[in-house]
């Protein structure tokens, strides 16, 4: 078990595009376990491998109240989506910043589970939002990229000041 350090926006490593996992072995399962531990400790409802500087297509999510419903998504792909919903988002890589982002209301996602079995899931609500947020990370995007240039500049300034006082 290990807690992994989480990259902070605007670290350029958050812009890397993650590679698909080609073989699900114990090192991938260990990565998922460490990512889950890191997500629960943060605490957050999801974490993409990109955020811990591992550029492989692995995501962990738990949107349950009880924090006992871990989902591991390897090589997730959105097959279809519909509807639009505006919801407040935050990100462990952009601490203290929250803003509204438009996302699909429902998504169908195909992925591999930790045993390498192909799975399909229809998601809505917070789970659908979180899946889209995490796949964005795998594609080198953070939720801030969905905001206006003015807001992005303000967020960079605010986080740079925070980094100075905590350094
Ligand atoms: O913990 C998190 N909460 C959250 C809330 C609304 C929309 C998305 C998220 S994901 C975030 C954890 C995170 O940064 N995952 O990448
Ligand atoms: Ni995030």
Image (cartoon, rainbow, N blue to C red):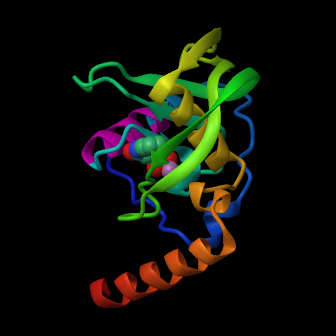
Residue 35, given in percent of the width and then of the height, sits at 42, 41
The answer to which image quadrant residue 20 occupies is top right
Q: Look at the image and give the residue range highlighted in magenta.
A: 31-41
31 with respect to 67 (left or right) = right
How many badges with numbers are in the image? 0
**Which residue is pictured at 47% across the width and 48% down the height?**
89
Judge left or right: residue 93 versus residue 148.
left
State whether the magenta stretch is mostly helix, strand or loop. Answer: helix
**Percent of width and height locating residue 81:** 72, 23
Give the image location of residue 135, x and y in percent. Answer: 65, 39
Where ligand 1 lies, by image quadrant?
top left
Q: Is residue 113 magenta?
A: no
Q: Quadrant of residue 40?
A: top left
The relative height of residue 33 versus residue 12 in the rendered view (above or below) is: above
In the rendered view, tell whether residue 167 sits above or below residue 102.
below
- The residue closer to the viewer here, 12 or 143, is 143
* Residue visible at 29% across and 83% down in the picture: 166
Q: Quadrant of the C terminus?
A: bottom left
Q: Nearer the viewer, residue 150 or 41?
A: 150
Q: Position of residue 129 (x, y in %)?
A: 54, 34
Quadrant including the N terminus: top left
Residue occupying the point 62% across, 43% down: 102
Task: Determine whether 39 is above or below 98 in the image.
Answer: above
Q: Magenta includes 37?
A: yes
Residue at 69% across, 55% down: 140
Query: Which residue occupies the foreground of this view, 24 or 56?
Result: 56
Side of 110 where 95 appears, left or right:
left
């Amino acid at each position: 078990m290990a807690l992994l350090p989480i990259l902070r926006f605007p670290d350029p490593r958050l812009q890397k595009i993650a590679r698909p996992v080609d073989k699900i072995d114990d090192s991938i399962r260990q990565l998922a376990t460490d990512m889950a531990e890191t997500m629960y400790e943060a605490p957050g409802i999801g974490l993409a491998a990109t955020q811990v500087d591992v550029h492989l297509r692995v995501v962990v999510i738990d949107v349950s109240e009880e924090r006992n419903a871990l989902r591991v998504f390897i090589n997730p792909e959105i097959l279809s989506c519909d509807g639009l919903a505006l919801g407040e988002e935050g990100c462990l890589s952009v601490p203290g910043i929250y803003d509204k982002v438009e996302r699909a209301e429902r998504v169908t996602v195909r992925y591999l589970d930790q045993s390498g079995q192909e799975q399909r899931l229809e998601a809505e609500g917070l789970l659908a939002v979180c899946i889209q947020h995490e796949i964005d990370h795998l594609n080198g995007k953070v939720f801030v990229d969905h905001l206006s240039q003015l807001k992005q500049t303000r967020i960079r300034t605010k986080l740079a000041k925070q980094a100075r006082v905590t350094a």
